[in-house]
Amino acid sequence: METTKQYIYIVQASLELSKCKIGKTDNLERRLNQYNNMTGKSKDNIYRYLFTCEVKDMTAMEKAIKEKFISDREINKREIYFFNDLKFADYVNFIKSHKLFVKEVFVKIEPPKHITKVKTVKRTTPTLKERGITAKDVMENAKSVENDEFYTRYEDVEKEISMYEKEIWKDKTVFCNCDDAIDVDKQGKIIENRTSAFASYFYKNFKELELKKLICTHFSNKFDIFKAGKNAYVAYITILTKDDSGKTHIDKNVYKLKDYNGSFDHPISLKILNEEADIVCTNPPFSKMQNYWKILIESGKKFIIISNITNVKNQPYISFIRNNQVWAGYNRVDWFENPRRQLTEASGHWYTNIPIENRPKSNLLKIMPLKNIPDEFKKYDDSKILVVKNGYIPSNVKKPFAVSVRVILNGILEKGYKLIEDKEYVPYYNKKRDFGKVLIQKI
């Protein structure tokens, strides 16, 4: 007798983009139809799956998700979770790394019957078969791009980079390995909507920073797949250099090769990273953040990148921070742009391995004897671990105590304290879970 398969899904309504629903089912098609046929729901508010996977025990898996992301869940409505691209990546990464995860699945489900079909027109473009791709290839690629295209604003790049000593850039090669390559018009002016904020910043400040070279790579996106076959990507590498007279030159090479897609982990990109780059500056794709950090840190290169604000408590990132291989940069990043260039709120932060001088936010740390900390900001959990809040740090406690990620980002590890574990610490009060913390201890 065949065992009924069990699934976990993430679904979203087209008119409710600030939230998603995470749930369980033994029939993905039936569950989606239930969402799209709810009484009282607008016919324009269409639900679609963002992620679906098979699991060993859907009830246990759903419970684990609820416990892990309790602060992102609308408790009274059970299934509803806060949504942005960073959060989505967190949800998917947690599910995929869980012991109950079996495999990701892709389901083709027809839209609800109340959606009007598009009028058929004469075809003027090649079919998917003629392009050498399938509908699944397009959907998977589009989903990947949608979740990963989260653009950094120019003002945020400028704000962070300007806080580092200018001398660190002199005669250095900067590598932006997750960006839109530089695109300029005939007059040499930047075409903003075809150039990333990172590339634009270093292009405009090339001479002032006295850079040796700027290299930007562009990953083939969902539009490129229509231009070429399944295994023939179009990827770009743009190189900005200066001659002996100090004049800058752009060398834009277009690759149309079946073995190069512009990804940061492709051999060509890795060769640039290991053999040419001095400093890496970029906003890596959220769905591939774990692999990106590993490759970048193992390369030994200097870097200034953006990542999720919670990386300081999430595996495997916390081990890099504990081993002093990476630390918080100067600023948080609260706003990004989506592919339509609309502002999207998210919780990001700069990370680096370049020394931080006079960190401004360290002034937010309130280091003092335990007795001087107000009672409302200190409490022992069920495990008798001291938990302190609101930036307070006990200066005379020798045992490990728990603090929020904000304390780490504000520079407590530069004040004579160290991380104790390579994982998040979760306090419980009367057996009820609280927000995740990290354990630190005075050196």
Image (cartoon, rainbow, N blue to C red):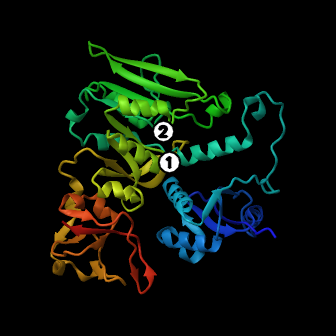
> Residues under labels 2 and 1: Cα distance?
10 Å
The answer to whether residue 156 is visible is no
Q: Amino acid at mark 2?
A: Asp
Residue under pointer 1: 288
Whether residues under marks 2 and 1 lie with C-beta atoms below 8 angstroms apart, the answer is yes
Residue at numbered disc 2: 265
> Residue 73: x, y in percent?
53, 70
Query: Which quadrant is home to the C terminus?
Result: bottom left
Which residue appears at 57% of the width and 74% of the height?
Answer: 63
Looking at the image, residue 442 sits to the left or right of residue 85; the answer is left
Question: Where residue 172 sits in the image (x, y, percent)?
Answer: 28, 29
Q: Is residue 216 above or below residue 63?
A: above
Observer-nearest of 31 and 232? 232
Q: Is residue 13 left or right of residue 304?
A: right
* Percent of width and height locating residue 418: 24, 63
> Hey, which quadrant is residue 249 in on the image?
top left
At horizontal 42% and vertical 30% (from top left) the residue drawn is: 271
- Residue 128, compared with residue 385, is above or below; it is above
Asked if 69 appears above or below 228 in the picture, the reply is below
- Callout 1: 10 Å neighbours few (<14), some, many (20+)? some
Amino acid, disc 1: Lys
Tell which circle, 2 or 1, labels the residue nearer the N-terminal end.
Answer: 2
Q: How many numbered circles does the render carry? A: 2
Counting other residues with Cα less than 10 Å from the Cα at mark 2, is it few (<14), some (14-19), or many (20 or more)? some
Question: Which quadrant of the structure image shows residue 438?
Answer: bottom left
Number of the front mark, 2 or 1:
2
